[in-house]
Image (tube, grey):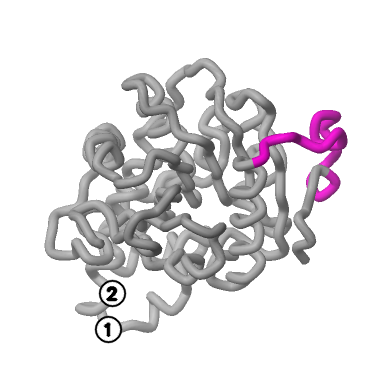
Amino acid sequence: MSTRWFELCGPPEPTGIVVCLPYAGGSGRAFRAWRGHLPPGWALALVDLPGHGRRMDEPCLHSADAVLAGLLGAVAELPAARRIVFGYSLGGRLAFELAHRLAEVGSRPDGLVVCMSRAPQTGIGHPPLSHLPPGRPFLEQAVEFGLADPWLLDGAPADVAPLADALQADLRIVETFGYRGRPPLAVPACVIGADGDWLVPEPALRGWDELCRPRPLHLRVSGGHLAVHRSPDAVMRAVCTAIGHIQRPAVPAAAQAGTPARGDHDGGMP
């Protein structure tokens, strides 16, 4: 099943759905390999924003509110009652806000998972880039800050341009979507980080503790900000652990005590 906003991967009549919001410049297909590793009956709703993935022929959006308005209506049409909202990097910031907006309209999700994503009150973690001239000047800076894969600099300009435009539009969302004070989100949550991710260091990950009740489970994997591509199995295992935690949200005593990083629960990951 595919819709304008989602590609639905999994059983035709799922009992639960993980709504997957990608990182800046990415598309939902980055998470497609997870579909065979979810709990029985669960499916993935892989999000493609306008100008991304299956929607490359559409103009990109530059406003988080425009993105969230479209997602809010689309999530309401998903076939399963149980929903977990997952977001990677920019997707984590959008996932948190989407979860709040779903709760406001009486459709509170079952849980939230954020991966390689700074808590919104901690800033963006890098200098603004979206104002730079499009093309190579922008891409060089994006690669330098770890926001884009270096292979983009080696591609033919005509092939790379749509990907660079999508990334630049998404970074504008990152840079203009300021923190909006919210009460703590009252759903089970999990925060996944990487030990080599300088864009999202430990204090920025721990900032989610202020925004979720109960306090989220923290998981860590080895790698950097693009670990979903460099260490895909470790990230997938972390996501599956997070889904299991949300289905059975008892938090280990060590996590309640705020044991540092991997001590909270590393789910057997490297």
Q: Is residue 27 shown in magenta? A: no
**Gap between marks 2 and 1, in whole Å?**
6 Å
Question: In the displayed structure, would residue 112 be above or below residue 37?
Answer: above
The quadrant where residue 237 appears: bottom right
**Location of residue 102 in the rendering, given as x and y in whole percent from the top left corner:** 36, 28
The quadrant where residue 202 appears: top right
**Location of residue 136 in the rendering, given as x and y in whole percent from the top left corner:** 32, 69
Nearest the viewer among 93 and 15 is: 15
The reply to whether residue 138 is visible in this rendering is no
In the displayed structure image, the side of residue 125 where residue 77 appears, left or right: left
* Label 1, residues with CA under 10 Å away: few <14, some 14-19, many ≥20: few
Q: Amino acid at mark 2?
A: Val
Q: Are marks 2 and 1 in contact (CB under 8 Å)?
A: yes
Residue at the image position 35 percent from the left and 21 percent from the top: 106
Nearest the viewer among 223 and 219 is: 219
Q: Is residue 251 shown in magenta? A: yes
The disc placed on residue 156 is 1
The disc placed on residue 51 is none
Range drawn in magenta = 248-263
Quick one: SS at disc 1? loop
In the displayed structure image, the side of residue 159 where residue 210 appears, left or right: right
Residue at the image position 82 percent from the left and 32 percent from the top: 258
**Location of residue 134 in the rendering, given as x and y in whole percent from the top left corner:** 26, 60
Nearest the viewer among 109 and 146 is: 109
The residue identified by callout 2 is 160
Question: In the displayed structure, would residue 148 be above or below residue 76?
Answer: below
Residue at the image position 52 percent from the left and 16 percent from the top: 183
